[in-house]
Image: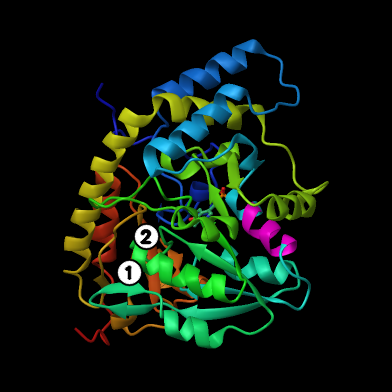
Amino acid sequence: MGYDFDQTIDRRGTGSLKWERYRGRDVLPMWVADMDFRSPPEVIEALRRRVDHGVFGYPVPTQVLVEAVVDRMKRMYGWAIEPDWIVWIPGVVVGLNIACRAIGHPGDQAVTFTPIYPPFLSAPRHMDRGLLRLPLVRQDDRYTVDVDRFERSVTDRTRLLLFCNPHNPVGRSFDCEEVRRVAEVCLRHKIVICSDEIHCDLVLDNRQHVPTATLDPEIEQQTITLMAPSKTFNTPGLGCAMAIIPNGHLRRQFVDAKAGLVPHVNVFGFEAALAAYQHGEAWRQALLQVLRANRDYLIREVNRIPGLAMGPVEATYLAWIDASGLGVDNPARLFEQAGVGLSDGAEFDGPGFVRLNFGCPRPTLEQAVERMSWTRPAACSR
Ligand SMILES: Cc1ncc(COP(=O)(O)O)c(C=O)c1O
């Protein structure tokens, strides 16, 4: 079946976070991580059927959905999970915050590798935890974790690693040896790993996503894995995600930490998740082709623009662009003035960078690139 990823869909006036930011202005929104594509037709159809049913009481995840998740983990990632390891939550960011609340005590410390998706920076603070920020290092044009520095920096208050793989914003899909070295530091220091793998189905290169928890049974026992159908199938507005927690003690801590605070997943979130997992694979494959082509186009074009540099993107639909060569304090503002709304790298602890969401039809991307190429301050160093 052919899918239409070329059609430009007008999202203005639909209450879209991404598009409302620039309401009434000629600025292309390429910031927050949702795509401008329709979800798979099977997802839309399942939602339509559920609307027609007309009764929207409190839902539970159906057995068939739980089986679909168990089956998916096995098939895609060789991970044999038990149904009761799954804790349903309305979002992965919620999961990051619950993990910070569940693990350790106020005054303890979480650690993360920067630059990083901003909720990783704020979640520890929300729960009165400190945050150790360790910069990723660049080796051969790829970002990686400085594992020795990580181990040296750990203190006896370091309780939780907030890990992101595939990584937003740098686009790495970490090799299993890199992840293993990170996880081994956590094992040695009894640090719980909260592994945000929301982008795991969006690996663009010919490589396999390896869930942290699958590396070793001991690592599995110390890991909270966060996943969701939302990035892959473009349903973040439907609020459905899961924490997979094999260790019963950790799972109880997590469940207790969310009690009374976190709402149920809603009926449409569950419905869309089931349809996506059961019927969305052909659509996902088609999407990956579109994203690969967009990425290849973008990397070629961005690196032609004086002052900008973009490295490889192994996974996600997010490009992390080094704009420091433009010689301006706030490159995101400059691009916004040129009509392209990007995420400001400073919010990710990556000042001088911008993040561009290329999950959009090609004409939108081409227009964005053209507008970005207008920004050439006299101080440009290239
Ligand atoms: C790494 C990562 N985690 C979590 C989220 C958001 O997840 P949710 O919408 O389920 O809270 C995003 C969205 O961009 C993300 O990139």
Counting residues from the N terminus, which is met first, the one under dot 2 or under dot 1?
1
Mark 1 belongs to which amino acid? Ile
- In x, y percent, where is residue 66? 57, 30
Residue at 51%, 34% in the rendered image: 70
Residue 284, disc: none
- Residue furthest out toward the top: 53
Q: Is residue 100 magenta?
A: yes
Distance between the alpha carbons at the discs numbered 2 and 1: 7 Å
Residue at 61%, 17% in the rendered image: 51
User: Which span of residues is magenta-colored?
Assistant: 95-102
279 w.r.t. 352: above or below:
above
Say what secondary structure mark 2 lies in: strand
Q: Is residue 267 magenta?
A: no
In the figure, is residue 219 to the left or right of 292?
right
Residue 356, disc: 2
Q: How many marks?
A: 2
Whether the residues at callouts 2 and 1 have beta carbons within 8 Å, the answer is yes
- In x, y percent, where is residue 15? 57, 40
Instruction: State the quadrant of the N terminus.
Output: top left
**Residue identified by numbered label 1:** 321
Q: Closer to the camera, 71 or 116?
A: 71
For residue 146, what is the image quadrant?
bottom left
How many residues crowd mark 1 within 10 Å: few (<14), some (14–19), many (20+)? many
Residue at 59%, 56% in the rendered image: 221
- Residue furthest out toward the right: 260
In the figure, is residue 233 to the left or right of 121?
left
For residue 269, what is the image quadrant?
top right
In the figure, is residue 156 to the left or right of 300?
right
The colouring scheme, among rainbow, by chain, secondary structure or one colour, is rainbow
